[in-house]
Amino acid sequence: MERKPISLKDFTVKAYNLFEVQWLLLTSGSFTQQQFNAMTISWGALGVMWSRPFAQVVVRPVRYTYKFMERFDSFTLCAFPREYHRALSLLGTKSGRDCDKIAQAGLTPAASSLIEAPCYAEAELVIECKKMYWQDFDPTHFLDPRLEENYPQKDYHRVYYGEIVAVHGTEKYAK
């Protein structure tokens, strides 16, 4: 997929659609060391915090990707054309502990431009992030009691804020 750098002032997405409908592939680890894992996500946010552009993602401690998010200082968020939806479904349901799910999904890991976490040759959008903050969800702070229904195992997410340091994508992501 041919992607070009997109300046943050020209980067444009429908955030709800990107997360909830299209889905994103979260990857953390090191491309050069060939130590990384990915998982499909449909929860998150994009915005500005501490005067920096950020992406916010959440990962449960039981997920294999969690150990990579804890060990490494960067992550990527990649969006793919519609024909990769099946691959993203596989990446969201299988564990990298048990198999090479990235190969099974037919994706080609590639070096990112500024960080160690890899991106994918097939991605139409790559958001490169350097971690800047994390915090565990505290269920005592849920104001809507229905939120607790998302945690029957009490495996509350850890939220990560990553400063967006680079964006590469197709023209549909640039205004």
Image (cartoon, helix red, strand yellow):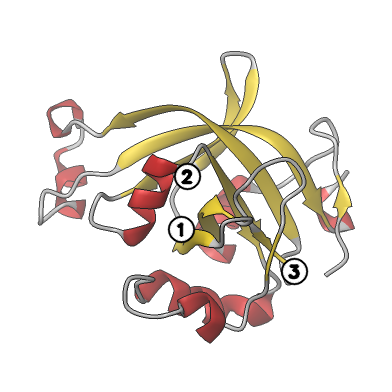
The kind of residue tagged 3 is: Ala
Q: Is residue 37 visible?
A: yes
Q: Which residue is mark 3?
A: 121
Q: Position of residue 4 (x, y in %)?
A: 89, 52
Query: Which residue is pictured at 50% across the width and 59% down the height?
Result: 35
Q: Which residue is mark 1?
A: 41
Query: Which residue is pictured at 66% across the width and 59% down the height?
Result: 119
Left or right placement of residue 18 versus residue 94 in this view: right
Callout 2–callout 1 Cβ contact below 8 Å: yes
Q: Position of residue 124 (x, y in %)?
A: 76, 63
Q: Which residue is mark 2?
A: 44
The kind of residue tagged 1 is: Ile
Query: Which residue is pictured at 64% across the width and 20% down the height?
Result: 52
The kind of residue tagged 2 is: Gly
The Cα atoms of the two marked residues, 3 and 1, are separated by 19 Å
Q: Position of residue 129 (x, y in %)?
A: 61, 38
Quarter of the rendering occupied by the N terminus: bottom right
Q: Nearer the viewer, mark 3 or mark 1?
A: 3
Using the image as rendered, state which of residue 171 and residue 103 is in the foreground.
Answer: 103
The Cα atoms of the two marked residues, 2 and 1, are separated by 8 Å
Q: Is residue 130 above or below residue 121?
A: above
